[in-house]
Image (cartoon, rainbow, N blue to C red):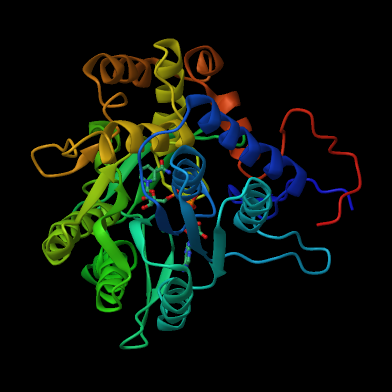
Amino acid sequence: MVIRPMIRSNICMNAHPVGLAREVRKQIEYVKQRGRIPGPRRALVIGGSAGYGLASRIVAAWGCGAATVNVAYEKPASGSRTATVGWYNTEFLEDQARSEGFDVATIYGDAFSDEIKDETVALLRKSGAVDLVVYSLAAPIRTDPKSGETYRSVLKPVGEPFTARTIDTMTGEFRTVSAEPATEEEIEATVKVMGGEDWQLWIDRLLEENLLLPGAKSVAYSYIGPELVKRVYREGSIGKAKEHLEATAKELSRSMAALDGAAYVSVNKAVVTRASSVIPVVPLYGVILFRVMKEMGLHEGTIEQAYRLFADRLYAGDSVPVDEEGRIRIDDWEMRGDVQQRVRELFETVDDSNLRELTDIDEYHREFLRIHGFGVEGVDYDADVTP
Ligand code: NAD
């Protein structure tokens, strides 16, 4: 069948297998070109099918030569429905990896559940313990395996209502978005879903099962961002979850100390992923940031970030460089004074008359399509494909 993008409320509902195969190959080629770096021998990537997790997996394999196990919530095609983005990414990555002699495996299912943890443990008992655990889930919902209760995360401010101007990156229209503050219950639910509780369950379980090698590291991803997006991100409900994730890293480092291991939160740059496209206000900041960072020769996507994270932070030497809060900062270029100064200036002046001149809106939108396999150079989108 011919597959065209189906977009509803800024969410792309389908995916193009040929386009995604090319996009994964591009990331692999980038890493091959940058060359081998020290790193893990065996990595478990939780959420390794898209965005930051996918890029981390590619760096672990092609950059460091590691065997990789991925856990992701993805679905194959059925009938006329395409598979999910992460399913195509994973299947293509693994075909390619096997043809180059890498050891790869994926467990598809809900990483928050006990069943999927059991399955992963069973697999690792056979294939071997790991020395890196990347925790890169971005999920809207989690069922607590102990209580059976289901929690939904929200992207809302905390305390006061919030109103700001943003842009619809699909249409290029400016919009005003308002949000009422999250209730206590909603904040708690967001922390349950996106905080560190599940990361801790994973590490505790792997420790219990002796599946972490001496010197093992674990890393989970966070975001801070500037003043412009603070109310809705860092000071919002998601920020509370990220604070919890950061506190969890410290606790995990204590429990991993016996095997000379450590856990980190890495604060990453704002990029276009399926998760980030649903965060309010961030799109207007994003389209300006991308323009500014490109002009300054500093622009990065997930693969450039993941490579720099492994090469210059996690495996740079005897100690991992961190900020005063103990976090890895790979958002250093995004947060540079000159970058943020320029972003603020443009944020004040951008309107309908100069949108395309001052921002990267068209390319941002194309990037959104590309992460779903659409608009990829060299792909014949009129051709019949088997989903
Ligand atoms: P993404 O949507 O591209 O990927 C999310 C991954 O989580 C996918 O592999 C998906 O299969 C997996 N997943 C979701 N629910 C799952 C479940 N129940 N069980 C198993 N797997 C599940 O997201 P992303 O943007 O790469 O986000 C990953 C992390 O990076 C998040 O913690 C996010 O906050 C952080 N981060 C993102 C940005 C950004 O700009 N996108 C910036 C900094 C930090």
The answer to which image quadrant residue 107 occupies is bottom right
Q: Say which of 242 and 159 sits in front.
A: 242
* Residue in the picture at 55% in, 34% down: 169
Q: Using residue 378 as the reference point, say whether residue 95 is left or right of it.
A: left
Extreme residue in the bottom direction: 147
The answer to which image quadrant residue 308 occupies is top left
Number of numbered markers: 0
Q: Is residue 189 visible?
A: no
Q: Using residue 11 as the reference point, say whether residue 257 is left or right of it.
A: left
Q: Position of residue 90 (x, y in %)?
A: 61, 55
* Residue in the picture at 43% in, 41% down: 64
Q: Say which of 280 and 265 sits in front.
A: 265
Q: Position of residue 162 (x, y in %)?
A: 29, 46
Q: Say which of 119 and 108 sits in front.
A: 119
Q: Position of residue 372 (x, y in %)?
A: 65, 45
Q: Say which of 332 and 159 sits in front.
A: 332
Q: Using residue 337 as the reference point, say whether residue 334 is left or right of it.
A: right
The answer to which image quadrant residue 94 occupies is bottom right
* Residue in the picture at 73% in, 46% down: 5
Is 152 placed above or below 148 here? above
Q: Position of residue 355 (x, y in %)?
A: 52, 18
Q: Using residue 266 as the reference point, say whether residue 87 is left or right of it.
A: right
